[in-house]
Image: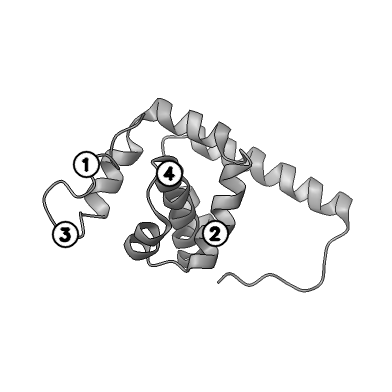
Amino acid sequence: MPHVSKRLLEREKFLGIHKELFKIIGTIARSNKSHLALGELFTKTEKLMLAKRLAIIFMLDQKESVYAIEQVLKVSPSTVARISLQYEKGFYSKLLTEVRKQNSFWSELSKIIPPRAGRNRFKNFLQFS
C-alpha cells in the first residue's frame, strides 16, 4: 500500500497540487510517450493499485460477482465492497464513458487475465453492453 504522510496539507495547498497533478497528467496523456512518463511518475505499487482499481470498476460494470473479482484480481472483499459502493453511487460514470470510446481495455485485459477454467469462462465479461 502506498505510504501517505500523516501530516496533512492545508486545503488550499492540497487543491493547488491536485490541480497541477491533473494538468500534468493531461499533458503527458496527449504526448506519444505517455507510458514512459507515467512509468516514472508512479511506483510499481501505485501502478498495480490503479490497474486493479480500474479492473474492479469495469468488472462491476459487467455485472461480475464480488467473488469472481476477488479471485481474478487477488483483492480483498473490503476493497471490492468499497469500490462497489462508489460505483453504485455513480462515481465512475465519466471514466466508464471515456474508456468505452477507446474500446481496447477489455481486449487488452483478456490477454492479461486469462479465463480461470473452462471454455469461454468470461465470454460475457469481455463484451460491452
Label 2 vs label 4: CA separation? 14 Å
| Residue that numbered label 1 is attached to | 123
| Residue that numbered label 2 is attached to | 81
97 to the left or right of 69: right
Q: Quadrant of the C terminus?
A: top left
Q: Position of residue 127 (x, y in %)?
A: 29, 34
Between discs 1 and 2, the one toward the N terminus: 2
Please report the residue visible at 37 percent of the width from the left and 49 percent of the height from the top: 64
Image depth: mark 2 or mark 4 in front = 2
Q: Position of residue 16 (x, y in %)?
A: 80, 46
Q: Name above or below for residue 64 compared with residue 1.
A: above
Between discs 2 and 3, the one toward the N terminus: 2
In the depicted view, which residue is nearer to us: 88 or 104? Answer: 88
Disc 3, SS: loop
Q: Quadrant of the N terminus?
A: bottom right
Q: Mark 3, residues whose alpha carbon is within 10 Å: few (<14), some, or many (≥20)? A: few
Disc 1, SS: loop
Q: Amino acid at mark 1?
A: Lys
Label 1 vs label 3: CA separation? 12 Å
Identify the mark at residue 58; answer none if there is no mark: 4
| Residue that numbered label 3 is attached to | 117
Q: Name above or below for residue 13 compared with residue 67.
A: above
Between discs 3 and 4, the one toward the N terminus: 4
43 to the left or right of 85: left
Q: Mark 2, residues whose alpha carbon is within 10 Å: few (<14), some, or many (≥20)? A: few
Label 1 vs label 4: CA separation? 14 Å
Based on the displayed image, in which of its 4 quarters is residue 73 positioned?
Answer: bottom left
Q: Amino acid at mark 2?
A: Ala
